[in-house]
Every structure is written in C-alpha cells, then in structure tokens.
Image (cartoon, rainbow, N blue to C red):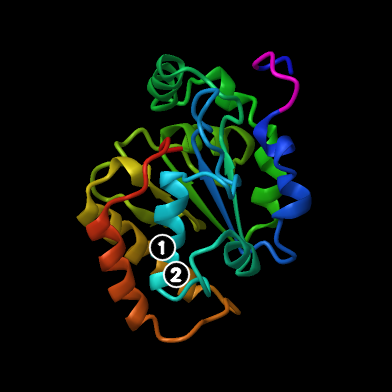
Amino acid sequence: MECCGKPIHAWEMFRVEKEWLPLDLRCFIVGENPGFDTSPYFYDENRAVSVRTILLQELYQRGNISSPSLPAFRAAGFLFDHGIRCYLPNGDVKAERRLARRYASPRCAAAKHLKPWIQRASTIWIMGYIARNAVTSVCSELPKDVGKISRAPYPRQIPEAPRFFVSRYVTRAPRKEVEMIFREFSSLLKSMPNYPRTADPQHRFLTGRAFYSQGVPSGHNK
C-alpha cells in the first residue's frame, strides 16, 4: 500500500468489515495505530492485546456487553479501528502523536477509512491524540481543541458534538483514571436512546477487580 509499503493492512487481513462489523453500529471506538510489525492486532483472537483486554473487561463489568469477548463486543454494536491503520515503529508513532496534538499529522489527514463508520455510529469514542486528529480530518462535526486530553475536563462527552466522547489512551492511564474513563463513557452509552441494557453488573465488578489484581496480560498496548 502507498501509505506504508505493506500489501494490506491488518484490517483487511483479519477481515474486520466482513467478520466483525455489527449489524447495528451503535459505538465506533477509534484508537491510534496497531503498533509495530510484530504487535498483535485488536481482532486477532489468538493473541493477547492489552487495550482489547481492558475494553472488554470494563464494558462487561458495567453491563455494556454480555461477556468479555469479541463476539459480545460485536453483538452489542461495537466496532474498533485505528486512526492510522499502518504498522509503524515506535519512534514514528511518537512523532505522529506529537504532530497530532496540534492537528498536523499527515497520516491522520489521510484517515478516510474512518468516515463511513463515523457517519453510521450513534456514539464515537476517540481514544488518544492520533485518533482525535484523524477524526477531525474527516469529520467537521467534531470541533478542534488543542487542550491536553490527559487533564480536565477530559475524559468527556463533547458538548458541541454530543455523540463524541474523547479520552486519553486507556493503556497509558493509571487504574483510577481508567475507572473514571469507563464510568463516564458508560454513562454516555446508557443515555443514548434505544441502547440495549444487560443484567445488573454487580458480579462483573467483582470479576473485574480480580482481573486487575492479576494484571493486564502482556502484549502490545495498541
């Protein structure tokens, strides 16, 4: 591909649009990039991915999905993609992130792949600076904000564009902040009309505590 020289992106390799696209796209989550060449991909069920592990466990314990699994994630209307689909060396990712803080990343400016899912989704969760730059490059609905997303008022629903939620990347946040991010995000989900509810997640909360006491599985954080 012209963007990175690879034959295809992991999105195509793992047939995400065919295998994992929900029938009713309720929430589109945008991350940064898949990591470097050997990093496990979000939709690779055979390998541990830290961001996926956190997402599935936190959504499950709050009753947003029926089990901490990719099939349940899809069934509840969730889809995950990256602002930059290319595998990149860590140094390149850091450079893109610095540029993205001021909406100046060339790779983010080319994120046309996000547009159809942004248009279809009821809620969009933007996770990290690269994701924020990528989304604003293809969607004028989201206003630009040069503030640091690791500080108040973030994480938050965007008042001028209420279907958008912006936070820092969950794998780079301390545990208490991760809890706050998911608490705010879950509140947004539950406020959306016709969003499906699952059973009382009390036992899931206990399961989540046990999960975090054991630590997040190893693997790349993208």
> At label 2, which amino acid type do we have?
Tyr
The prevailing secondary structure element of the residues shown in magenta is: loop
Above-or-below relation of 104 to 194? above
Q: Is 203 situated left or right of 124 in this image?
A: left
The percent coordinates of residue 180 (x first, y second) are 27, 60
Q: Nearer the viewer, residue 60 or 99?
A: 60
Residue bearing the label numbered 1: 57
Which residue ends up furthest to the bottom in the rendered image? 200
Residue at image position (41%, 38%) is 219
Q: Is 18 situated left or right of 218 in this image?
A: right
Residue at image position (57%, 79%) is 196
Residue bearing the label numbered 2: 60
Q: How many residues crowd around disc 1 within 10 Å: few (fewer than 14), some, or many (20 or more)?
A: many
Per the rendered image, the range of residues in magenta is: 4-8
Residue at image position (44%, 66%) is 59
Q: Is residue 115 magenta?
A: no
Location of the N terminus (image quadrant): top right
Which residue ends up furthest to the front in the rendered image? 46
Mark 2 vs mark 1, CA separation in Å: 5 Å
Q: Nearer the viewer, residue 11 or 189?
A: 11
> At label 1, which amino acid type do we have?
Gln
**The quadrant where residue 50 appears:** top left
